[in-house]
């Protein structure tokens, strides 16, 4: 049988003889449908829907506005598992649901590009790309996957081809000047999957296809240490970290639900239950490794672990909103500052790409008061369109969109011309006050009213290249196969 057929047979055998779900006050299939809507983001429709284009010319003319810049805050593409399936399932089952990946990140030194340019060569030494070997240890000699943890899967290429094409078609012809790689701000958290996603998106924005041109040159990618990057929700703030940790410990579903679930999980799979087991389940589902009905039945243990994790996460984010605001607030402030400079003409890069994670986008939406309970999908793109009045000193207005629909940010009301938001009112006061060094310092050390905040180093650093900036070689292949 083909591998897919073997996988489905193994899963069918494991999932037969299910026992009824313990009584609960929620509908498992409905929660999955509502909160994980299109989470896999199989291209191209979700990506096309994310880029509706700016306000039409007639509306802009009527209100004396011009469209001047676009910021794209996006999640990485489809990835391999973060949490090992071997901790959740028997080895045979775990082997059947993990995925190989052909997209491999690697290393290219700026020195190589400089040396190649000096010698006037067309091509230089190829980049090194990572090839993961299976893990040794308790799960046997090696796993069945050549992917390391949280590496992009092949589908990410098609996802970013669709997103790049959608953004290019909807926005490039409407900006004051058509963007180029040189006129685009690239920021990514310092992880393989977000850096590789940034590479893919810029490739499809400026090369147009998988067979696009590959000039030998570098492009600057901005990043920070993971230990101090608000775009990775990791700013040094003890009070916020403590509040988040406490909320995580207290969050979740009742023992009436979790107790029987743990018992049935152990009886079925022979492994202790962990809410982290939702990760290999969702990854396998998006990769087509699960039967079509594996997450749709009320008696599916796999569906229950996904729901249990979502309820835990939902409670954690909402119950510690102030703490999460302090952790992602600096990223929102940086985004606002960047948009302001774009509107004022002080920032020449009219297109900015910010690569991050679902666990950053979600608390950002919570902090802004616009999270609708839907988990960010792969390549989720939050767009911040920047407009400027032709008169009135060039006042800046913005429109924030998710999945192609404008978000009604409470702090934006009353709305301005064309239903736009005053850029200075985009962020709620809980975020805006983090600019004050004294306030941040007091709150971050637990001396305030419980709202923790990060130190000032995380705010406004986008004005100059970080000392942690990297040079990538988009032409010579950060990713193999492009």
Image (cartoon, rainbow, N blue to C red):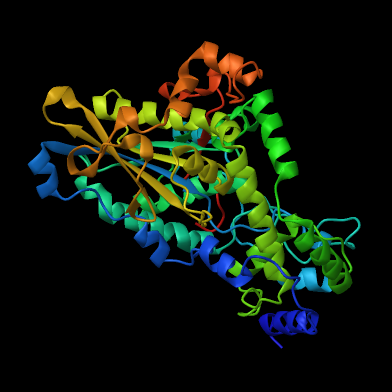
Question: Is 90 above or below relative to 219?
Answer: below
Picture residue at 56% right of the left edge, 59% below the top: 78
For residue 288, which quarter of the picture?
A: bottom right
Q: Quadrant of the N terminus?
A: bottom right
Q: Nearer the viewer, residue 454 or 425?
A: 425
Front residue of this view, candidates 166 and 121: 166
Q: In the displayed image of the protein, which residue is found farthest to the top?
A: 438
Query: Which residue is depicted at the point 61% across and 62% down?
Result: 102
Count of marks, rendered view: 0
Q: Is residue 361 above or below residue 88?
A: above
Residue 127 visible in the current orientation: no
Q: Inspect this view and state whether residue 402 appears.
A: yes
Judging depth in this view, the residue of 334 and 322 nearest the camera is 322
Q: Is residue 391 left or right of residue 188?
A: left
Extreme residue toward the bottom, this view: 1
In the image, taking residue 354 as reference, residue 228 lies left or right, namely: right
Q: Position of residue 354 (x, y in %)?
A: 45, 40
**Front residue (pair 437, 114):** 437
Measuring from the top left, give residue 384's x and y in whole percent. Answer: 34, 41
Residue drawn at x 13%, y 47% is: 59
**Residue at horizontal 54 percent and vertical 48 percent from the top:** 196
Image location of residue 473, percent across then percent down? 50, 41
Q: Position of residue 9 (x, y in %)?
A: 74, 85
Please indicate whether residue 478 sits to the left or right of residue 101 in the image.
Answer: left
């Amino acid at each position: 049988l083909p591998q897919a057929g073997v996988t489905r047979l193994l899963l069918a055998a494991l999932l037969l003889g299910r026992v009824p779900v313990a009584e609960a006050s929620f509908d498992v299939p409905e929660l999955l449908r509502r909160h994980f809507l299109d989470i896999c983001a199989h291209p191209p429709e979700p990506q096309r829907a994310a880029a509706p284009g700016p306000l039409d010319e007639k509306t802009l003319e009527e209100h004396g506005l011009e469209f001047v810049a676009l910021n794209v805050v996006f999640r990485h593409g489809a990835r391999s598992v973060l949490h090992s399936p071997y901790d959740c399932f028997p080895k045979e089952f775990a082997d059947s649901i993990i995925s190989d990946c052909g997209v491999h990140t690697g290393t290219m030194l700026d020195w190589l590009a400089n040396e190649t340019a000096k010698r006037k060569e067309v091509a230089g030494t190829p980049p090194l790309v990572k090839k993961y070997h299976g893990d040794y240890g308790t799960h046997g000699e090696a796993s069945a996957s050549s992917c390391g943890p949280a590496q992009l899967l092949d589908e990410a290429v098609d996802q970013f081809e669709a997103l790049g094409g959608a953004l290019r078609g909807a926005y490039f012809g409407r900006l004051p000047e058509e963007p180029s790689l040189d006129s685009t701000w690239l920021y990514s958290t310092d992880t393989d999957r977000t850096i590789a996603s940034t590479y893919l998106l810029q490739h499809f924005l400026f090369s147009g296809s998988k067979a696009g041109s590959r000039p030998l040159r570098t492009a600057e990618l901005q990043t920070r240490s993971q230990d101090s990057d608000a775009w990775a929700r990791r700013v040094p703030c003890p009070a916020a970290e403590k509040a988040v940790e406490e909320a995580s410990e207290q969050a979740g579903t009742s023992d009436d639900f979790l107790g029987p679930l743990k018992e049935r999980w152990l009886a079925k799979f022979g492994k202790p239950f962990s809410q982290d087991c939702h990760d290999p389940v969702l990854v396998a589902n998006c990769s087509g490794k699960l039967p079509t009905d594996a997450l749709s039945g009320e008696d599916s243990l796999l569906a229950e672990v996904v729901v249990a994790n979502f309820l835990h996460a939902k409670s954690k984010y909402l119950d510690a909103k102030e703490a999460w605001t302090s952790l992602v607030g600096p990223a929102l402030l940086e985004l606002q500052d960047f948009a302001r400079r774009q509107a004022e003409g002080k920032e020449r890069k009219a297109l900015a790409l910010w690569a991050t994670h679902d666990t950053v986008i979600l608390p950002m939406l919570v902090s802004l008061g616009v999270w609708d309970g839907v988990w960010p999908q792969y390549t989720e793109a939050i767009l911040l369109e920047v407009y400027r009045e032709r008169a009135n000193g060039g006042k800046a207005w913005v429109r924030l969109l998710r999945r192609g629909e404008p978000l009604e940010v409470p702090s934006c009301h009353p709305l301005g011309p064309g239903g736009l938001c005053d850029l200075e009112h985009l962020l709620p006061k809980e975020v805006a006050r983090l600019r004050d060094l004294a306030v941040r310092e007091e709150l971050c050390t637990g001396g305030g009213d419980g709202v923790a905040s990060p130190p000032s180093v995380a705010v406004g650093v986008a004005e100059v290249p970080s000392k942690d900036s990297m040079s990538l070689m988009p032409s010579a292949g950060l990713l193999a196969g492009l």
